[in-house]
């Protein structure tokens, strides 16, 4: 069982930055594929970024967001810059404990955090 706890969300103005953190349990964290998803009100949860030994990004955030991990701290980060109002959503951390492939779909991940709210004002 893997527990994930997100933090770092908040209210920012358009053009601003935030860094989200996700702390994970597990002694084999370094082998997990970690992902970030987001869900805006009335919309489906969508892929944002993932990291294994490489990084992957949705087109909507490429060039603005950076995913990284610190395996010694069992933590994955999402550095968000040049935020836009359309980035407003609850952001969820996800883990694939037994990755075969890196996934950009919800069904590709086994464990989820509780989410952290990101609100971008214009």
Image (cartoon, rainbow, N blue to C red):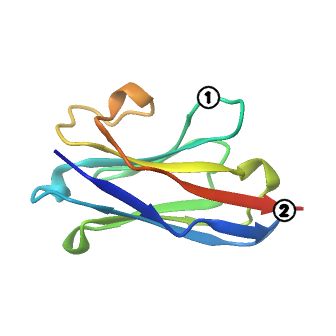
Residue named by callout 2:
121
Name the residue at 9% across, 60% down. 27
**Residues at marks 1 and 2, CA–CA distance in whole angstroms:** 21 Å
Residue 81 visible here: no
Quadrant of the rendered structure where residue 108 is? top left
The answer to which of 113 and 56 lies nearer the viewer is 113
Name the residue at 35% across, 52% down. 54
Work out which quarter of the rendered image holds the C terminus and state it.
bottom right
Q: Position of residue 93 (x, y in %)?
A: 42, 50
Which residue is outermost to the front? Answer: 114
Name the residue at 27% across, 32% down. 101
Q: Position of residue 46 (x, y in %)?
A: 57, 35
59 on left or right of 20: right
For label 2, the crowd category at 10 Å Cα-Cα, with few meaning under 14, some 14 to 19 and many 20 or more, is some
Q: Position of residue 78 (x, y in %)?
A: 50, 62
Residue named by callout 1:
44
């Amino acid at each position: 069982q893997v527990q994930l706890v997100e933090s770092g969300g908040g209210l920012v103005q358009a053009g601003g930055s935030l860094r989200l953190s996700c702390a994970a349990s597990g002694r084999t964290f370094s082998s997990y594929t970690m992902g970030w998803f987001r869900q805006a009100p009335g919309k489906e949860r969508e892929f944002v970024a993932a990291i294994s030994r490489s990084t992957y990004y949705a087109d909507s955030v490429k060039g603005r967001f950076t995913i990284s991990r610190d395996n010694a701290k069992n933590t994955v980060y999402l550095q968000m810059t040049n935020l836009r109002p359309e980035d407003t959503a609850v952001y969820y951390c996800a883990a694939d404990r037994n990755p075969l492939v890196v996934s950009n779909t919800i069904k590709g991940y086994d464990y989820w955090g509780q989410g952290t709210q990101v609100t971008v004002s214009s």
